[in-house]
Image (cartoon, coloured by chain):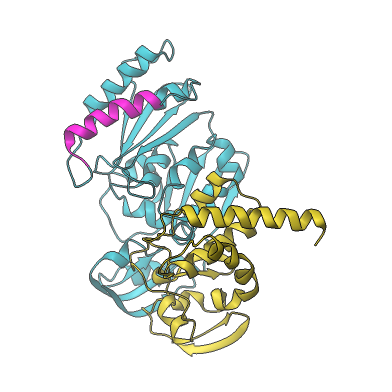
Amino acid sequence: MQISMILNGKKIMAEAEPDMMLLEFVRMQGCYSVKRGCETANCGLCTVFLDEKPVLSCSTLAVRADGRRVTTLEGLQEEAEEFGVFIANQGAEQCGFCNPGFMMNAIALFRENPYPSEEEIKEYLAGNLCRCSGYEGQLRGILAFLEYKKEMEQKGE
Amino acid sequence: MLTFRNYQKVASLEEAYELNQKRANKIIGGMLWMKMENRNIGTAIDLSGLGLDKIEETDDEFSIGCMVTLRELEIHSGLHQYTNGAMRECVRHIVGVQFRNVATIGGSIFGRFGFSDVLTMFMALDAYVELYKGGVVPIRTFARMERDNDILVRVIVKKTPMQVVYMSERYTKTDFPTIACAIAKNSDTVTAVIGARPYRAMCVADETGILKHGITEATARAFGSYVSEHVRTGSNMRGSREYRNHLIKVIVRRAVLRLGGKQNAD
């Protein structure tokens, strides 16, 4: 089947098998930030935005994205770069494999709730598994980023 | 591995119904559970083009289309207010936000899965399901029906005066529940709905009037024991029958106390 979508701001058209998952499809389009993890809809590594909502691309049919907007980390460079510095500063990733999915979902959280509490952060990111970090570094990174954002806003920047 | 030869985004429920009469074809909701199965499907029937992804609220009821996601149930202000937060509590532990943005209420309810938090909650709300051919059926009846080739179109929640509390016990956050429990109180009685027994959820009403004269520590404990005695449980990798029987006593007592206004019942 031929499907079209806006992938990272660009309109694309490509063939997709009826049972092809969005994960496979976006990787075929060169979006290698989207990782294949558990493939059982549990780990969050394959998170992409479908019309601005974070979804698991390992469990979403590519044909269901027909005519819609799909965003991967490649399409969020600026937002991700600013936030990513705080994650790196905390040494919050070891192998880094979970990081793209984690960044995507964290960005979805900030868009929905710009200043979440610690509890809200933990709840929103519960579907992103990391086998290296124990999550503490990631949490510290997020809190430091939120503090920075607040300071910038107060300064009017 | 799940494979299918064709995909059809249908233009009407009739088209979906006709396709669904073939054994090889299947209606797909969020497709999360179905994807775990090892099967070959002829045509995957997609209802996502039928506008069934909305929650409509009137003065009398909530009408929830089968393609509404669990995340939409979680953040809907009307449902949140009507259930005093119990709707959010019932879905917020299900894997993660990304999962709940994909999983649909239709898939959760039609599957009548034993582990279902969603079925447990909607049974406590005494909801109805609208089937394309079967008409409107109480969800408590639907939960006992065998699977057929009809289509679950909507779930309807009547706005009757009631209180509901939802609690579950899980080994870890985001895991399946070992026991799911919703307690509902209306003008007539208190009903406990127990899911993840591990079988499909079932209701136990306070038929002997244990809570008739009010909720106290003693009556809540007695109701917990009563429910535990009247629910058939089983064993699986998450817990033994005996463990579940014990959990039911504890979780029902805590939920009833919370229903009675004790916020830190646990």
Q: Nearer the viewer, residue B222 or B189?
A: B222
Indicate the position of residue A152 as horizontal and vertical percent values.
75, 58
Q: For the view shown, which residue lies furthest in the top direction?
A: B213
Indicate the position of residue B163 as horizontal and vertical percent values.
50, 28
Q: Quadrant of residue B234?
A: top left
**In this picture, residue A27 sits left or right of residue B149:** right
> Is residue B155 visible to us here?
yes
Question: Which SS type dominates the magenta stretch?
Answer: helix
Residue appearing at x 63%, y 39% in the figure: B59
Indicate the position of residue B7 as horizontal and vertical percent values.
39, 78
Q: Quadrant of residue A114?
A: bottom right
Residue appearing at x 59%, y 79% in the figure: A8
For the C terminus of chain B, give its image quadrant.
Answer: top left
Rendered position, B4 above or below A98:
below
Q: Nearer the viewer, residue B123 or A136?
A: A136
**In this picture, residue B25 sits left or right of residue B102:** left
**In this picture, residue B33 sits left or right of residue A80:** left
> Is residue B73 visible to us here?
no
Q: Nearer the viewer, residue B102 or B51?
A: B102
Indicate the position of residue B243 as horizontal and vertical percent values.
21, 33
For the N terminus of chain B, give its image quadrant.
Answer: bottom left
Residue appearing at x 46%, y 47% in the figure: B92
Magenta-span inclusion, residue A111: no
Q: Which chain appears cyan?
A: B
Q: In the image, which residues are magenta?
A: B239-254
Rendered position, A34 above or below B107:
below
Magenta-span inclusion, residue B247: yes
Rendered position, A98 above or below B73:
below
The mark tally for this picture is: 0
Q: Nearer the viewer, residue A96 or B71?
A: A96
In the rendered structure, the colour chosen for chain A is yellow
